[in-house]
Image: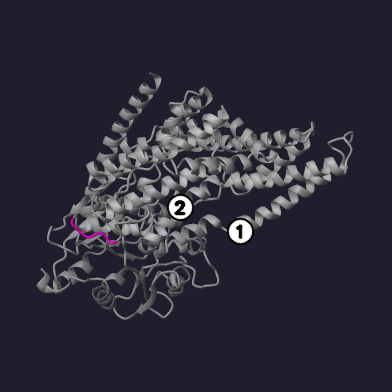
Amino acid sequence: MKNKIILSLSFLLLLFLGYYGHVWISELNQVQSKIQRSKMTPVIFVPGSSATINRFDDLFSNINAKNVNHSILKVKVNTDNTLSFSGSIKSSDKEPFIVIGFQDNEDGYTNIKKQAKWLTIALEALQKRYHFRTFSAIGHSNGGLNWTIFFEKYYDRNSFDVPILMTLGTPFNFSENSLNRKTEMLNDLISDSHNLPKNLQMISVAGTEDYTDDGIVPIQSVIAGKYVYQKTVKSYTQITVSGDNAQHSSLPENPETVKLIESNILKHNKRSNR
Amino acid sequence: MNRLVITTYKVDQWLFHFQSAKSIVIALKQTVPILAVNIYLHLLYRLTIYPDSLMSYFFNHPLHVAPPIADNIRFGLSLLDGLVIMIFVAGFTFNYLSSQLIHDTSLPILTNFLITYLVLSGNNQFSTTNTSQYLLITIFVFFSVRSYAYQRTHFLKDTVSPYDLRNLLWSAIVIGLTMISYHYIVNMHFQSSFSTLLSKNLFSSFTGLLLIAVLSPIMFIIGFPLPSELTDDQTTLNTVISNLDAFLNSTNAVLPFPENLYSTYGSYTLFGGIGNTIVVSLLLLFMKNEPYKRLGKIAWLPSLFDNNYLLYSGLPMFFRPILIVPNVLVSTFSFLISYLAIALHFVKPVIFITPTHLPNLLLPTIASGTPIRSTILTIVILIMSYIIYKPFVMKLTSEEN
């Protein structure tokens, strides 16, 4: 009699677990299959410290004036982890531009680490909303540091696939102009570099105004990125641009930078694709 | 079949006429009460509080427990894991030396306790979910008690104090040698080497899968460390991920690896633990012999959630030929039947990832594209497992009455 009760209760338990298990699998598969089948591969931009989500407006106008009109979505992550959206993504747009900025956009290593976490929150929310898996990443100044910390600490290759990262004037060694003096941040980035995705192509762009820096970031600090990325990811390319708009804050609009973005990152950049 | 049962039983009896083997069996059975408490607490923890608990999957968050309390629970559980092994070691040492008429066993028990503590804490793995400790620790303790008994009977008089310098020297040598051997064994990285091996192409072929179905029960019962891919988690293997990717891209896609470790071995040979041992719990549940019936009752719920460590210690299964043979037969035939059923398109392979800790019994039904047929296949395999286990378990329990 007792055995019959044990077996009946077990059967009921299995029915309960089976039902909830089935619901869980169905929900997960729906989301996963949308992500898997998504043909959208956005380009996600992260501005540097003190810059707002409008930091790349000139770059976008420049690209959209010449080529296919990429829709633009801007996301601001607030300090309480909530998100504010502006702009929209057209349903037909396979390569929209998304900017992720932060309410607390102050400089400093502690803040940059917080911003990397906020970046992860924004990416997860965007994936839930737009069901994309693959995207390209661009970071200006400290935005490149946000991406690096994201890849080292929060990136899950089962959720996202990022084939290319481009950093513009990113100070991997803050304001140090000697590679012999490594900051705490650079040491941390080097020690966690084994977590960087192996399939990532990294392009680091530096600007030179006077052969030593871009007005703010020493070129040696940008070059220090090689200690983090070189021989760790699929490829690491370091490019220096000069001439007009080569100073730090104008780097995204520099004609050479625009060409680099168009040739290395944008895949749907022909009028016929519109 | 009857001849096989009798032959296996004879081998089992031959092995267990040795005093050391008898002492191991008694010591394992002595751990059952504390092991039961341990396993039920682990089960409760994994179903409710654990960040990856079933509750967190179904209701979107685990039972809220303040982080310091959760940390203490985790710490307490790992201590309990260690305590189970230590009670086994103390029991083995005491039972063996008592049989050799050595009555003061305090020094060897202390020595073996220390060895166990150093081995377990050295690898940060106070865990009963892995049988690796049993083989390794049993070997260490076996040599320790044999050498102590030899020394006492050949070189020292009975009147010598157990804490005499010569005895203390024995203790220091045994601890030293054990730690040196343990260092070398750990550096062989058995489990990670196996995991790497399992990602090789051979193990997505019929021969490779058959090899796993045959060898994993043997390795499990002799207490050899098994990688997690062979006990509960095959979903990280490339073949499984490729299948899921293909399905998510198109529901009608041809799967690249329909017969893989997850869809055959993982889905149809692990009901209640390696070798479908849920059937053994069921057999014990209906025994007339009260101690076995009690073991069946306490082992039933953990078995539902694929934990067979109460059977491992309670029967015990450890190093028992009479249980290795049916375990291998069940594992092999279950694999063959499931492989054929998939190859002949009777069922679609299990491809979906399920919540962690969900009973394996449900896997074919909810994680394949053919729930009804897969359920029928599960029932067929369970009936076959029952038929294979019954004569062996009956022989074992009736002879021990």
Residue A145 quadrant: bottom left
Residue visible at 36% across and 65% down in the picture? A141
**Of residues B222 and B383, which is closer to you in this image?**
B383
Q: Which mark is residue B214?
A: 2
In the image, B370: left or right of A47?
A: left
Marks counted in the figure total: 2
Q: Mark 2 vs mark 1: which is more N-terminal?
A: 1
Residue B375, position as x, y percentages in the image:
27, 41
Query: Which region shows up in magenta?
Result: B252-256
* Main secondary structure type of the part rendered in magenta: loop
Residue A94, position as x, y percentages in the image:
17, 63
Residue visible at 50% across and 51% down in the picture? B226
Residue A72 quadrant: bottom left
In the image, B126: left or right of B111?
A: left
In the image, B3: left or right of A96?
A: right
Residue A126, position as x, y percentages in the image:
25, 52
**Of residues A234 and B305, which is closer to you in this image?**
B305
> Which SS class for mark 1?
loop
Q: Disc 1 sits on a residue from what chain?
A: B
**Of residues B166 and B289, which is closer to you in this image?**
B289
* Residue lying at the far front of the rendered structure: B3
**Of residues A192 and B312, which is closer to you in this image?**
B312
Residue B113 quadrant: top right
Which quadrant holds the N terminus of chain B?
top left
Kind of residue at badge 2: Val
Q: Which mark is residue B187?
A: 1
